[in-house]
Amino acid sequence: MKLINKTILSYLLICIPLMIAAGAVSYFLIRNELSDGMDETLEREKLNVQKLIKSFREPANTYLGYDSLSFTKVVDRNFRSEDIYSDTSIYHKKKSERRNYRMLRSPYTYNGTTYLITLARPTIEEEQLMDSLFSAFCIIIGFFVFSFFIVSWLLSKKLWRPFYQTLTELGNYDIKQHKTTNFKPGKITEFNQLNNELTKMTDKIHNDYVKQKEFTENASHEMQTPLAVVRANLSLLMQSPNLQESEMNNLEAIENTIRKLTSLNKTLLLLAKIENNQYHENTEVNLNERIQASLDLFSSLIEAKYIKTELQIDPEVCVNMNASLADTLINNLLQNAIRHNNKGGLIRITLDPNSFTVSNSGEPLSITEEDLFVRFKKNDASIDSLGLGLSIVKSIVGIYGMQIRYKYSPPCHNFSVYF
Amino acid sequence: MKILLIEDEVELRKSIKQYLHQEGYLVESAADFIKAQEKTGVYDYDCILVDITIPHGSGLDIIKQLKEANSKAGIIIISAKNSSDDKIVGLDLGADDYLAKPFNVAELNSRIKALLRRRNFEGSKTITVNEIVIVPEERKVMANGELVALTQKEYDLLLFFVINKNRVLSKNVIAEHLWGDDSDQMDSHDFIYVHLRNLRKKLTEKGCTDYVQTIYGMGYNFKVN
C-alpha cells in the first residue's frame, strides 16, 4: 500500500468514530439547550396564568388562549404540588400528522382553591431549528474533513516527491555501470540527508566493487609469473637424461596440474576483464564468418565424436561487439555442445537477425537450469572441464545487453543468444 | 646468437637462461629498466626478450628506445599482462612477437627461432635435419629430395619438433603450440597422437628415419644425433 493511501486511510479510520461522537454530543447539547429554552417559556407563561388566577373572583376552570390544550382546572386540595414537564405527541386531524408538544402541569393554590395549570406548546419550530443546526454542523464538519483529506493528499504528494525521485534513482542504479547516483537536492532536510547518505553509500559500494574486481584481476596477473617459473623449471627437469618411469609419471602429473591451474587462471582473468569492461573496441562482427572459423577449429573434435552438424545460417547477420569476445562466445558454446554430446550425436547451429542458437543432443541435465551459468558448476564432474565456459558466455552476453536462454527439448539442449 | 633477457623475476630469468643456453645461445640478462638500458646502449643483440612490467620503468620504453636507435634486434615481449592493449601497443612500437606468461620455454624457443629465421640471421631460409629439409616461407617439407604433403597441423608439429630437437616435449606443450588458447579441450592428447602417427607414416614412406621417440608418461623427443 502506498504511503499516501495508508496515511489517508489511518486518518479516515480515526476520524469516523470521532465525527460520530462529536455529532452525537453536539446533537444532545443543542437539544438540551432548546428544551431548556422551551421550559423557560412555559415557566413564564405559568406565572402569567397564576396572575390570571389571582384575578378570579371565584374558582373556575378556564381555557387559556394559546390553544385547547392549555387550561386551568380546579382540583382536589391534596393534589401533588410539583411542576411536571413532559413531552407528548398529539395527532392533528386537520393536518393528519402527529405533532410533538412540550407540556407543563403545575398545581397552584390560591385562596384555598387548588388549580392545575396545564400548558402545552408545540415544539415544531424548535425541532426545525434543531434539524437545521445539526445539518449545518454536519456539513461544516464534513467539509472540513473532506478538505483536510484533499489538502493532505496534495501536500503528501508534493512533500514526498523527492522521496519518490530518490527511489526511482536508486532503482535505476546499476553497480556495474560507471555512473554515480545523481539525487536532486530539495528543500526538506530529512530527504537531503537521506540522499547524502545514499550517495555516500553507493559511492562506497561502487569503490569496493571496483577494488574487488581489480583484486581478482591483479591476483590472476600476479600468479602468471610464478606459474611461468614452475613451467620453465618443469621443462628443464624433463630434459634430465636419467629419469625413471615413475619420476616421468610424477612429472606428467605435475605438468597436467600446472596446465589446469594455468587455464583456470587465464579463464578467471578473462572473466575479470570482461566484467571490467576492458573489451571496448567494438566492430561489426559477421557472425557467420566467426562460426565457420570456430567449426574449423573444432573440426577434428567433431569428427572424432562422429557428430553430425546442421547449419541454418543467415550469412548477413552482423553484431556490433568486440571481435575477440565474439570468438570466445561462439567457441565456448560450440565447445560445450561438443563436450556434452553423445558419440554420433548432432549439433545444430541456427543464426537469424534476432538470435543465435546452438543445439546439441546429449543426456538430460543433472544440475538445475539455474546452475548452468554459475561458475564452477559442472553437469558431469568427471569431465575434464573447468565449469567456467557458460559463465563466460553469460558475462559476454551481459555486457552487450543480450539475453542467453536455455531450453531442453529432448533429445536436444538449446542455448540461444538473443541480440 | 646473442640474446638479452629483460626480466625481473629471478627464478624465471634463471630457467629461461638455462634452457636457451642449452640451445646454444649466448644469453645475457637484465633485471630492471636501468640495467636493461645500459646493456642495450652498449651491446648489440640478435634478439631481446622484454618483460613489460619491470622495476624503474616500462619494457615498452625500452622498445621505443631500441627503435629510435635503429636497433636491428628482434624483439619479443614476454608479459604477465595478457591484455590486447599491451599487445597492440607493443607490436605498434615495433616488437616482433608477443608471448603471454605463463608460457612454455619450448614455445619461447620456437618463437625465437622463427623470429631469427624471418630476419635471416642464420643465413639460410631452410631448416635442415639430416634428410629432412623444411622451407618455412613456403610451408614446404622435403624428405630425401621428395616433397612430403603434410596437413597444416602435421607441418606445425614437425616444425615444432625440429626446432626443439633433442628435447622432451610434453603433450601439453605440443597441444598448446598446435591449438594455442583453445588447447584446453578434452582429448587434445589423442589428437596429437593421431597427427603424429600420420606424420610418422608420411615421413617413413619417403624413406626417413623415425626420429620421434615416445617418452613414456611424458611426451615425445625428436632425437637427432
Image (cartoon, rainbow, N blue to C red):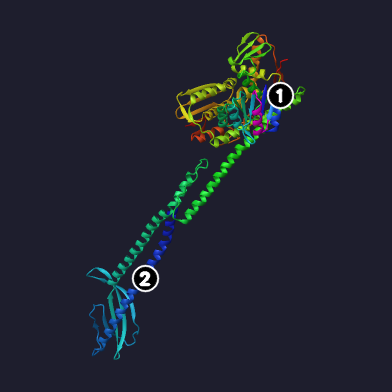
Q: Provide residue A131's location: percent of width, then percent of height.
A: 31, 67
Residue matched to label 2? A28
Of residue B119 and residue A223, the one placed in the foreground of this image is B119
* Occupied quadrant, residue A118: bottom left
- Residue A99 forms part of the magenta stretch: no
Query: Which is more foreground, mark 2 or mark 1?
Result: 1
Give the total of numbered labels: 2
Does the image show residue B147? Answer: yes
* Occupied quadrant, residue A389: top right
Q: Is residue B63 left or right of residue A51?
A: right
Q: Which residues are magenta?
A: B30-46
| Amino acid carrying mark 2 in the image | Phe
Q: Provide residue B181's location: percent of width, then percent of height.
A: 60, 27
On residue B21, the disc is 1
Q: Provide residue B109's location: percent of width, then percent of height.
A: 66, 23
Is the residue marked by circle 1 packed among few (<14), some (14-19), or many (20+) residues within 10 Å? some
| SS category of the residue bearing label 2 | helix
Residue A309 to residue A60: above or below: above
Chain identity of mark 2: A
- Residue B31 forms part of the magenta stretch: yes
Of residue A271 and residue B40, the one placed in the foreground of this image is B40
Asked if both marks, 2 and 1, belong to the same chain, the answer given is no
Residue A252 to residue A16: above or below: above
Q: In the image, what residue occupies the spot 46% across and 27% down?
A: A318
